[in-house]
């Protein structure tokens, strides 16, 4: 038995590219009405026009409380409910701590951690009232392993894992599921890889990266489990990633 996704209202942050856009395309095939949120409205408009489902495009910076309030409010106004929050917006900074810029780190934490907390806080009253919902957060293998070449990014994803594991227990009695999708290296814009042929070579031929579509398939799997099943963490790696 599966959880029927048809008609489920889904908010996707970071929807303009990569995992967010791939997940929008995957969920559109199930007839999910979608709120597509990101800072780049031009990319969102192009994506929305390509989808065979009802969409709402909302320019959103997840570091801005007013943007999040508008995103959630307009979703409720348009669709009447929120069934899924896919908190996917994130940025990536690797490198040595000694060479880094603390202001850049603060921005990363604002997006990767504070943005997730704020989006979650904004949807919880609606999910609690309807006694159902899924909150799915894009984490990373870096939330499970201390990866020395990306210490600030790893710190942000460790924070996300702590949040997922504790929030899940707080809201389980309200019928709300909470989980994380934690991929390894994904060949997409976050890693500076945009050429489709290069993505296919790195992923399909070399087994060195995942594709955004691979992660989207895993998201659909998690959301489509029957209501009594919670996949708290789904960790997925390229076959050749040595972690």
Image: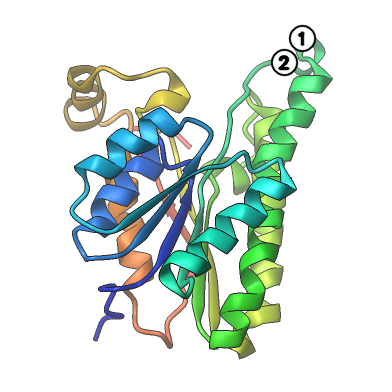
Residue under the point 31% across and 62% down: 220
Q: Position of residue 188 (x, y in %)?
A: 37, 28
Q: In this view of the protein, which residue sits in the foreground, 186 or 51?
A: 51
Which residue, given by chain and number where applicable, does mark 1 sit on? 99
Q: Are marks 1 and 2 in contact (CB under 8 Å)?
A: yes
Residue under the point 72% across and 15% down: 96
Determine the secondary structure under disc 1: helix
Residue under the point 35% across and 72% down: 8
Q: Position of residue 137 (x, y in %)?
A: 54, 55
Quadrant location of the N terminus in the rendered image? bottom left
Q: Is residue 221 visible?
A: yes
The residue at the far front in this view is 77
Q: Position of residue 99 (x, y in %)?
A: 77, 9
Q: In this view of the protein, which residue sits in the foreground, 127 or 218?
A: 127
Relative to 77, is 168 on the left or the right? right
Q: Which image quadrant is residue 166 in?
A: bottom right
Determine the secondary structure under disc 2: loop
The Cα atoms of the two marked residues, 1 and 2, are separated by 5 Å
């Amino acid at each position: 038995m599966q959880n029927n996704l048809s008609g489920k209202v889904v908010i996707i942050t970071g929807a303009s590219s990569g995992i967010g856009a791939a997940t929008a395309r995957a969920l559109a095939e199930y007839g999910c009405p979608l709120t597509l949120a990101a800072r780049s409205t031009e990319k969102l408009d192009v994506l929305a026009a390509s989808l065979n489902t009802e969409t709402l495009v909302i320019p959103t910076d997840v570091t801005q409380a007013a943007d999040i309030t508008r995103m959630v409010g307009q979703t409720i106004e348009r669709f009447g409910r929120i069934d899924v929050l896919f908190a996917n917006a994130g940025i990536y900074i690797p490198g040595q701590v000694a060479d880094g810029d603390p202001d850049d780190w603060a921005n990363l934490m604002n997006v990767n951690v504070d943005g997730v907390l704020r989006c979650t806080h904004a949807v919880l009253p609606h999910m609690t009232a309807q006694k159902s919902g899924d909150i799915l957060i894009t984490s990373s293998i870096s939330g499970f392993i201390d990866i020395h070449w990306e210490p600030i990014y790893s710190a942000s994803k460790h924070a996300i894992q702590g949040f997922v594991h504790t929030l899940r227990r707080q809201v389980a009695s309200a019928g709300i599921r909470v989980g994380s999708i934690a991929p390894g290296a994904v060949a997409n814009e976050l890693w500076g890889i945009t050429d489709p042929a290069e993505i296919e070579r790195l992923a399909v031929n070399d087994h060195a990266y995942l594709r955004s579509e691979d992660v989207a398939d895993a998201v659909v799997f998690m959301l489509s489990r029957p209501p009594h099943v919670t996949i708290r963490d789904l960790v997925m790696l390229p076959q050749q990633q040595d972690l």
